[in-house]
Amino acid sequence: AAIRRHYLARVMLIDCCVGRIREAVDKRCDAGTTWTVLTSDRGEVLGDRGLFGCRTFVGSGAYVPLWVTPPQGRVEAARAGDEALREKDRLVSGVDFAATVCALAGVDELEGCTGRSLLAGFGGNVGRDAVMSEDEQTVLLHTMRHKAVYESATGKLRVLFDLKYDPDERT
């Protein structure tokens, strides 16, 4: 409980500071061209299922936050996009972050980068049907319906979740 309280207190402090940074940006003369991008290096595992730290592909350990705030006036333009497209859930991957930053900076994507810019999501559909992630011992394949974790060395299936019927990844 103490670990969870301390972690969440730090998150609240960061949230407050990010709000202050955004307020300062909005007061600048170049606010109309300034994007704010915030992400984390990992998800959170705060005792869910007795786990602490980020050595799991369970949802709370695999999902990381990504906030992309457009310049003033850009949000209203994004809201004018097709509602049906914006409401369709899709997956994005950490590899999309580099492509998004390149698009924001107006430079060519990195050679060999498989990521896709997320900027299209401000006015329509963005994302993938499936994403993969790996660590030293496991590979994750994630679709909107299923999540499968395999052993890297053998290809043996460790766990398979049906996210429609088991969104909390319990069985």
Image (cartoon, grey):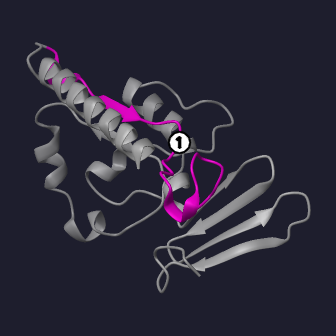
| Position of 42 relative to 128 (above/below) | above
Residue 57 image position (x, y, % from top left): 62, 58
Query: Considering depth in this image, is 42 or 127 the residue closer to the camera?
Result: 42
Give the magenta range: 30-58
Residue 69 image position (x, y, % from top left): 25, 37
Query: Which residue sits furthest top?
Result: 29
As drawn, is 139 to the left or to the right of 56?
A: right
Query: Which residue sits furthest right?
Result: 154
Image quarter (top left, top right, bottom left or bottom right) of the C terminus: bottom right
Q: Residue 151: name its quadrant.
A: bottom right
- The answer to whether residue 58 is visible is yes
Q: Residue at x 26, y 53 (%)?
A: 123
As drawn, is 151 to the left or to the right of 32?
A: right
Query: Which residue sits furthest front?
Result: 2
Query: Considering depth in this image, is 21 or 110 the residue closer to the camera?
Result: 21
- Reply yes or no: does residue 13 show up in magenta: no
| Residue matched to label 1 | 42
Magenta-drawn stretch, dominant element (helix, strand or loop): loop
Q: Residue at x 30, y 30 (%)?
A: 14
Q: Residue at x 25, y 28 (%)?
A: 18
Q: Residue at x 24, y 23 (%)?
A: 34
Q: Residue 21: name its quadrant.
A: top left
- The answer to whether residue 118 is visible is no
| Position of 101 relative to 131 (above/below) | above
| Position of 129 relative to 161 (above/below) | above
Secondary structure category for the residue under label 1: loop
Residue 39 image position (x, y, % from top left): 42, 36
Residue 30 image position (x, y, % from top left): 16, 15
Q: Amino acid at mark 1?
A: Arg
